[in-house]
Image (cartoon, rainbow, N blue to C red):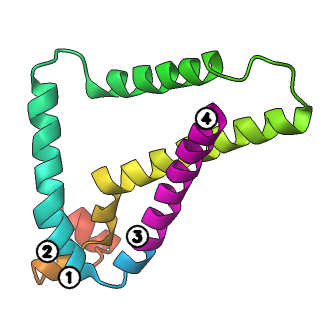
Amino acid sequence: MGKVKSLFFSFSGALFGVVTLLLNKLAHGHSALVETWYSRGLFIRVRHFWEVLLSYSSVPGFYFFWTGVVAYWIWVWWRRPKQVQSRLSTVKYWLGRILGFSGFLAGSFFWLWGFNYARVPIQEQLQFSPEPLDSVRLWTAL
């Protein structure tokens, strides 16, 4: 049962990351949908949740994140198969764990922040067209 559970979590983390990356690729073609559904909907709720959760702590969330990462890898190392196994079996175990963790990390980043990169650009939202400054105009402004 432990091996199946380990494979399930590794596979599900990797699948979560791959599906999220594909969804991000599609999102860049539909900026208006990302703007209404994610940036002005889900993301605001997620951000509010984290602000409320972390506002009671005097420790930055960055430290909580890295403490969680280190604790996870210590837990994985502690729960690793103890019996002597072939080198290929050990490599597959660790590769599965690393791929699962990386997929979960990438997917979490995109759901917590990364889809904002697919938004409608601020210049289009404000109907503003920035123009580059040449050095003469820049020096006369000073």
The tally of labels here is 4
Classed neighbour count for the residue bearing mark 1: other residues with Cα under 10 Å, few (<14), some (14–19), many (≥20)? some
Classed neighbour count for the residue bearing mark 3: other residues with Cα under 10 Å, few (<14), some (14–19), many (≥20)? many
Q: Position of residue 92 (x, y in %)?
A: 77, 42
Helix, strand or loop at disc 2? helix
Q: What amino acid is at disc 3?
A: Asn
Query: Which residue lies under the disc numbered 1?
Result: 32
Image point 47% across, 66% down: which residue? 19
Query: Which residue lies under the disc numbered 3?
Result: 24
Query: Which residue lies under the disc numbered 4?
Result: 1
Helix, strand or loop at disc 1? helix
Magenta residue check for 3: yes
Classed neighbour count for the residue bearing mark 4: other residues with Cα under 10 Å, few (<14), some (14–19), many (≥20)? few
Camera-nearest residue between 1 and 130: 1
- Give the Cα separation between the discs numbered 4 and 2: 43 Å
Range shown magenta: 1-24
Q: Is residue 105 left or right of residue 127?
A: right
- Give the Cα separation between the discs numbered 4 and 1: 45 Å
Vertical side of 22 occupied by 46: above or below: above
